Amino acid sequence: MARTQGSFSGVTGPRIQDAALKLFARHGYAAVSMRQIAGEVGVQAGALYNYTPDKQSLLFDLMRGHMDQLLAALEREDVPDDPCAALRHFVRFHIRFHLVRRDAVFIAYMELRNLSPENFDVVEGLRRTYEDHLEAILQRGAAAGVFDVPDTKVATLAVIAMLTEITTWYRADGRLTQDEVEAQYLALVCRMLRGAGPDAM
């Protein structure tokens, strides 16, 4: 039987993930069928199972891949030792990484509920690893007396949620440039942490 055009694994595997990412972000995981994903790629529905066992595996691979990329990118960063400088670095890194991955960010946060328990545990573990990086910065700053943070875990979750929310509203052709948005969010984070005033940052 002739191979469907574009079904070579090196080409179709990434195309399937790209199609699933777009459809999940647009319609929601529960509303998307494997047949729709196949139609987006241009292959027969049965051909998808040469590359993924099921839709749950596709969702998991997308979410785990997003977190793996995030952690790998963070690992490559040269993070300053000074907690104020490290916090400034983290804020900018988080904004810049996530703004160019809106669909992946949307799925990573909105579709956690659709992961199987074992897949949820894996993705949640990767999320905690990322959160731990910021919490360590806050803990160093609190110990040094430059951050006033009663609960570093709560502060960590609040900062990450606030920064990630930018992906839902920022547009490059909007009123503010990305640099201006970053500056404003740096100031907001400073106020949240109180001891890390604008001069310190």
Image (cartoon, rainbow, N blue to C red):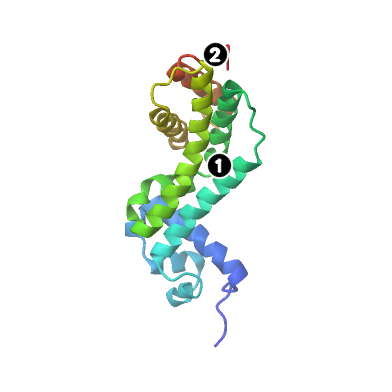
Vertical arrangement, residue 35 with respect to residue 90, above or below? below
The residue lying toward the viewer, choosing from 111 and 38, is 111
User: Residue 160: which numbered mark, if any?
Assistant: none
> Residue 167's spot in the image, x, y percent?
47, 37
The kind of secondary structure element at disc 2 is loop
Q: Which of the 4 image quarters holds residue 11?
A: bottom right
The kind of secondary structure element at disc 1 is loop
> Residue 197's spot in the image, x, y percent?
52, 13
Q: Residue furthest top?
A: 199
Q: Residues within 10 Å of mark 2 (few under 14, many from 20)?
A: some
Q: Residues within 10 Å of mark 1 (few under 14, many from 20)?
A: few
The residue tagged 2 is 198
> Residue 48's spot in the image, x, y percent?
47, 72
Vertical arrangement, residue 189 with respect to residue 171, above or below? above
Q: Residue furthest front?
A: 143
Number of callouts in the render?
2
The residue tagged 1 is 100
In percent of the image, x 36 and y 61: which residue is there? Answer: 32
